Amino acid sequence: MAEIGPTRDEAGPGTDSSGLGPHLALRRQVAAWAACDPDPETRAELERLQAEHAWDELAERFSARLAFGTAGLRAALGAGPMRMNRLVVRTAAAGLVSFLQEQGHLEPLVVVGFDARHKSDIFAIDSAAVIAAAGGRAVLFERCGPTPLLAFAVRHLGADAGVMVTASHNPSTDNGYKVYLGDGAQLVSPHDIEVAKHIAAAGFEVALAAADDPAITVMAPSVSQAYVEAVVAQLTPGGARQLTIAYTALHGVGAETAADAFAAGGFPRAHVVVEQAEPDPSFPTVAFPNPEEPGALDRGLDLARAVGADVLLANDPDADRLGVAVPDGPQCWRVLTGDEIGVLLADHLLRHRDRQGERLVVTTVVSSRLLARLAAAHGVHYAETLTGFKWIVRPVIDNPTWRFVLGYEEALGFAVGAAVHDKDGIAAALVFAELVAECLVENITVSERLELLARQFGLHATAGYTLRFGAGSSGAAAAAAIMERMRVAPPGSLGGVAVSRREDLLTQPPPRRTDLLVWELADGARVLIRPSGTEPKLKVYLEVLEPVAPTAVGYHAARMAAQARLDALQTELAALLAPS
């Protein structure tokens, strides 16, 4: 078969009768890819790009192969090895089976799940067919479902691996491919490197089993039932359950499973944003299907006000993340940050669940430092990891005798208990609903619960923002250029406060090594900057510390001061990090 990736002997300009000699090698790569591509849509896309002489775009698409990032493979849908398509997926499945067989799983059992994004079902069916043809066994979702169900099913079924076809909260143009091993956690080094080697060796001519091959089975409904039971088991026995819930699935796959879990947990039926309840891969009512994004919760907030809800709970499209908003005065609502949700969940669980044995809470280096102080106050183990739940669950797996209470990342990812070795927006929604119901019993608001924590530990106010760049390698290059500039010429002060400590995690040994800059300021504030592992963008994280005066207005004054400080830092950093 002809080479599909770039080759050294064809890298230079060729000649041909069309006068497009400099693109001869590229056109050969495109032709080789098209010869293997099973999808008429992506083959037609390549023909159109060539007819339009879109050589720069084609060169970018064929510049390399997708690599495992923070959450597996993820990219825009389209033709070529740098996009998500059927050929990339088939090769990934073949490489995964080859890796598993090398590890001694000669007939590996792989659970294959998918969400409702464009082509997710096709990618999942292709994966199952490749697994079966290679000598493995595939258990396929009967229909689209949540990512935490897939992570749960891997361990519940004793599988050797799992695949989830999803791009989580990315734009509608994207799709992705998450890979889990038998421990129910996503790939980490060195396994991700080894799987990538097997994918590269697999080639693009991949065998497929027939749809009715007995090695391909459909996952039984009992697995979903077991997942719901495991989620409900994270609640406090006899805990409060009476409250009014507003819920939105943001056009994703979470609504049905969340409803089952709320019912099994003894909660009243939630009021659901009807126009966002059914899966829709185009996400017609939101610009970005991410509860973090401004405007994403607007319809949910409208419903919450209309029904007099005590809380708004929102899952992202594959239901592994949770957004929360709570009343904060008459007709006023407060959208909580990921750090606020995480610390509230930790405080609730540490106060109400069984205190016997050694307990563990985990968060990431870019999350608030408040969880460490809370853990110390409760005398429980605390671990801090790199970003991504593939890292957050490692202390859980490495310390099986400790009882895992909570792991969270500020990007609205939460794991409650050890039933799922990944973030789980449905389990977190149930426990947060219990937390709100308890506040109602105690005649306290969620904001007042946060105030109590701030009075005990000081106000830890966090914020984040994103710098987005163009798609593909050009966007990644722009982000990398800014990171390099900040390494060479970092600021000496921000907002008139000296930068007292700098850390570049690229200089650290594994497993702490990652592309992240940390700047600590003399007043206790902190700035962290890193490129995203799933999209062409830079993510900036801010944290400021404010003491809370022991007066009635002390907390309000601290919140005002912290917000002013965050706003000033963001303004200064936006100018500092602007592309040159």
Image (cartoon, rainbow, N blue to C red):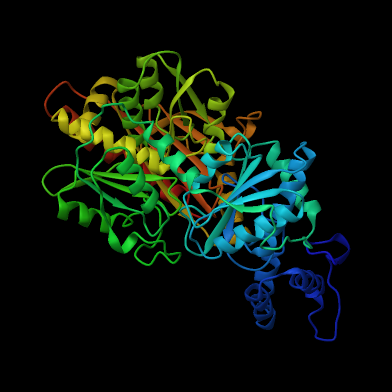
The residue at the point 74 percent across, 53 percent down is: 94
**What percent of the width, then of the height, locates residue 554?**
16, 27
Of the pair 1 and 99, the residue shown nearer to us: 99
Total label count?
0
**What percent of the width, then of the height, locates residue 572?**
39, 45
- In this view, the residue farthest toward the right is 9
**What percent of the width, then of the height, locates residue 334?**
23, 44
The residue at the point 13 percent across, 30 percent down is: 443
- Name the image quarter holding residue 437: top left
- Name the image quarter holding residue 206: bottom right
Quadrant in which the N terminus is drawn: bottom right
Q: Eyeballing the image, is 333 above or below 391?
A: below
Q: Is residue 276 left or right of residue 107?
A: left
Q: Eyeballing the image, is 484 above or below 189?
A: below
Q: Is residue 132 left or right of residue 536?
A: right
Visible in this render: residue 530? yes
Visible in this render: residue 148? no
Of the pair 457 and 438, the residue shown nearer to us: 438
Of the pair 515 and 416, the residue shown nearer to us: 416
- Name the image quarter holding residue 24: bottom right
Of the pair 441 and 519, the residue shown nearer to us: 441
